[in-house]
Amino acid sequence: MSKYNEIMEHIELNDEMRERIIGNIGARQKRKRINTAVKMISALAACLVIAVGAAALLSRDKLPQTPDDSSPNVAKSAESEILAGSADSDDGQTQHGYDVQEYGGANELSDAFGVKLHDIKNLPFEVTEQCYSVMFGDFAEINYNGANGEYCCIRAGKDTEDISGDYNEYGTVKDIDINGTTVTLKGNDKRYYLAVWINDGHFYSVSLSDGIDEQKMSDLVRDVMG
């Protein structure tokens, strides 16, 4: 086992780091994923530099195997590794850092996470890319991207904790009933960007880059509910 891996094994995410990372992932959905291959190569190069540096420090200063988890540098390194690192696992899934896995489709994602999700057809933009992920073991995500930077992000949590990643303050917050479930819509000027609800002990969210009216958001939520 490399010295770098020994260091990373002892790093644990506290609640503040986890919330910040989830928020960052939510914010990243607002940008189309561009040049994935370049990002992966850059991340690999960064990991190599960190590994060499960590090994050199251990050799020179004889640092203990367990780093100080409160160190800002260690925390930033762990956060960057989770957000940027990626590798292919033996079963064909793509692993990002230590807590993110990608799957080939909605069925694979549902089977892996244990919450039923399916592809959405009637989105307010033309889909050019989609991604299926489990983040930190806490929520499953289907992300749709459009050619002009549009996105729709659908999430399902393992429990009732808010995992939407959207902590903006909206001028309009409205509860509506859809199929017997209370759904909270959030937006501005009669255009809604976020819908959240709880069903069967799981928290669900739908977030959009471009707001849509109440009827279209309601129809989208119905589609997600199946």
Image (tube, rainbow, N blue to C red):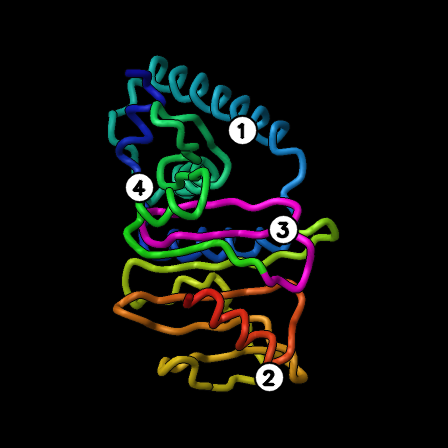
Residue for badge 3: 145
Q: Badge 1 local density, few (<14 within 10 Å), some, or many (20+)?
A: some
Task: Find residue 166 and report its horizontal and vertical position in percent.
Answer: 51, 65
Task: Find residue 183 and report its horizontal and vertical position in percent.
Answer: 43, 79
Asked if the residue at tag 4 contacts the one at tag 3, i.e. Cβ–Cβ closer than 8 Å, the answer is no
Residue for badge 1: 43
Of the two numbered discs 2 and 3 on the same chain, state the one appearing first in sequence.
Answer: 3
Which of discs 2 and 3 lies nearer the camera? The answer is 3
Which of discs 3 and 1 lies nearer the camera? The answer is 3
Residue for badge 4: 69
Amino acid carrying label 1: it is Ala
Circle 1 sits in a helix, a strand or a loop, which is it? helix
Residue for badge 2: 171
Magenta stretch: give its range.
122-144
Q: Is 9 in front, or is 172?
A: 172
Asked if the residue at tag 4 contacts the one at tag 1, i.e. Cβ–Cβ closer than 8 Å, the answer is no
Asked if the residue at tag 2 contacts the one at tag 1, i.e. Cβ–Cβ closer than 8 Å, the answer is no
Q: Is residue 195 left or right of residue 95?
A: right
Of the two numbered discs 3 and 4 on the same chain, state the one appearing first in sequence.
Answer: 4
Amino acid carrying label 2: it is Gly
- By secondary structure, the bulk of the magenta-drawn segment is best described as strand
Q: Is residue 206 left or right of residue 36?
A: left
Residue under the image location 68 percent in, 59 percent down: 125
Q: CA distance from mark 1 to mark 2?
A: 38 Å
Q: CA distance from mark 3 to mark 4?
A: 36 Å
